[in-house]
Amino acid sequence: MANTEMNPVDLAGVEKLIEATDALVREALAVASKRTDGGKGIDNEQVHCERLAYAATEVRAARDLFAYAQDATANHSDPSIAAMAGLFAGEVALELRAQIEAHPAEFGLSDDRLNATLGSAELRTLIRGATADRAVSAIGRHIMEQRGVNHSWLSDDMASMTRDSVRQFAEAEVTPRAEHIHRHDDLVPDELIEKMGELGFFGMSVPEEYGGGDMGNLPMIITTEELSRCSLAAAGSLITRPEILTKALLKGGTDRQKQEWLPTIAAGQIMVGISVTEPDTGSDVAAVKCRADATELKGQTGYAINGAKAWCTFAGRANVLALLARTNPDPKSGARGLSLFIVPKDAFAGHEFEMRQPGGGMLHGKADRTPGYRGMHSFTLALDNYFVPAENLVGEAGGLNKGFYLQMAGFAAGRLQTGGRATGLSQAALERTAEYANDRKQFGQPIGSYQLTQHKLGRMATYVMAGRQLTYAAALAMDRDESIALEPAMAKLFASDVAVWVTQEGQLVHGGWGYAEEFPISRYVVDATVLPIFEGVKPILELKVIARQLLA
Ligand SMILES: Cc1cc2nc3c(=O)[nH]c(=O)nc-3n(C[C@H](O)[C@H](O)[C@H](O)COP(=O)(O)OP(=O)(O)OC[C@H]3O[C@@H](n4cnc5c(N)ncnc54)[C@H](O)[C@@H]3O)c2cc1C
């Protein structure tokens, strides 16, 4: 299809649509804020608050995609970007309108208000034009022509160079290993980690004074995206754990701790596991039970750690665990009784390990089998009088009982990373699907010549781009203010959902072959489903992070 077939899109109209949608969401947030006493009563209105958190996230994504479309069309000739911005804004507006119509009392918005805004003749015409079947199918044809490849315009030269070089690296080093690791549930090979370390992948956001590249969050996210495009588990997720510990150390570590740990993290010399979750404690992090009690071993002061942990990814291969434990034995102390420890251990291959310390401490780990996200293995851990020196308490004496807050700072960075991970995985699914739709013939024609396949590809590409721009905008926002939590949470929420949906749409376009292991789309589907679960399972992210902040 020639690009000229794409309808020209009036970006001023798209902006008007986003403004109207945003205004309604803001009005609804004000109503909900009042009803929940600034978010304190969210639990009495969970269903509606979840709905609002999602709507606000989608509006933010529509704004970020629109801003990108404005820049990109001024600098780059791809007409599909403006069409995507229009389509996404139109679908978000349609969804919000349907929600308000179904739940007017909860939204606190009358039919008159709705009719005067999204229901007005002008906006209805805009929505119809932006979401018209032929407009969406035209995007899909364009994507098929490009075989789905992401050449999206980047204003930042460093980000653009990073994308080119990491893409080349990942295609050469990760793609050839990805299927084998997935099907055999192998461990990521050390050789790959070493190469990534040499290229500085683990230290991109570590300040230069600690041996990092200090390149900021955007190149780091793009690195994660490109690695995840080749494999989520065997490469794309490797940077996340060091990044979480880095952010916790930068926020609350002592100078000595930063000097000791950050250079080795940046060089990829130590691998990190993050150990928060316990068998009986997941979302309610403040209820963590694993204990750390002050003790002394052969004249060295430290802590004896006792308890069980669950789902600690990469705990076998990791050289240290960033472990959250209770230092105030009174369970009523909740989040204010937890501390973050850097727990050293030996690196083990395989799915089970046991580490015995000379002083009698023991750490046992056994990996739980999972359908996807293979390559790093996620372990259930048992700690029995495992000794950790006092100097490994993050923040040392000043960090006692501050672990929850340091962990949350780390999680914000982790969520931003997950926006990048999800976008890379979605991108991979889009490319494989565009290729398949070009190559596969049924009823005498490529399946991509059918209107419905084109329409599917058009929507898939649009949502992948919306997730990408939301994540990039969150990365830049975090460069400006490290303490933000809302934007990374929104990026994680939306991009993860996109990954689940786009991989499953892609699988359908592959028909039966989408279910066969030999087609990577089947791996993408099982990998994607973990994304809305970790770092705050979707409902908790919506209620306890996003809604809470929006309503405060
Ligand atoms: C493959 C994998 C890797 C992981 N890696 C790590 C890791 O490296 N380190 C780590 O610490 N953890 C890790 N996790 C754990 C992950 O972070 C937790 O699974 C997640 O936080 C959810 O906790 P949970 O599983 O205990 O679910 P729960 O907290 O039991 O929640 C289950 C469901 O209950 C509902 N629910 C719970 N509370 C509420 C509420 N207040 N209001 C409304 N609904 C509610 C929600 O629907 C929620 O989805 C990993 C998990 C997986 C699957």
Image: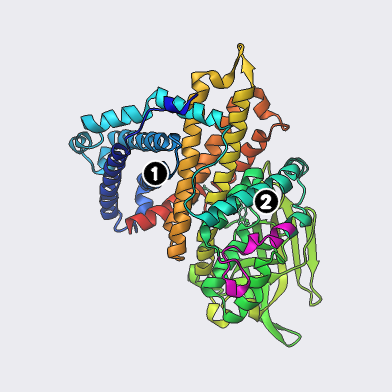
The residue carrying mark 1 is 74
- Looking at the rendering, the stretch of residues picked out in magenta corresponds to 195-214
Quadrant of the rendered structure where residue 394 is? bottom right
Tell whether 175 sits left or right of 478: right
Residue name at image x 60 percent, y 24 percent = 438
SS at circle 1: helix
Residue in the foreground of this view, choosing between 381 and 89? 89
Which residue is painted at 78% across and 43% down in the image? 184
What x and y, as percent, mark residue 255? 58, 80
Question: What is the spatial separation of the Cα atoms under label 1 and label 2, in whole angstroms?
Answer: 35 Å
Image position of 113 with respect to 401: above or below: above
Relative vertical location of residue 285 with respect to residue 389 in this rendering, above or below: above
Q: Which type of secondary structure does the marked residue at label 2 adopt?
A: helix
Residue lying furthest top = 443
Number of numbered discs on residues: 2
| 160 and 91: which is toward the camera | 160
Q: Nearer the viewer, residue 262 or 31?
A: 262
Q: Badge 2 is on which residue?
A: 235
Q: Amino acid at mark 1?
A: Ala
Residue 419, how many percent across, how many down?
A: 52, 50
Kindly tell me whether mark 1's CB lies below 8 Å from ligand 1: no
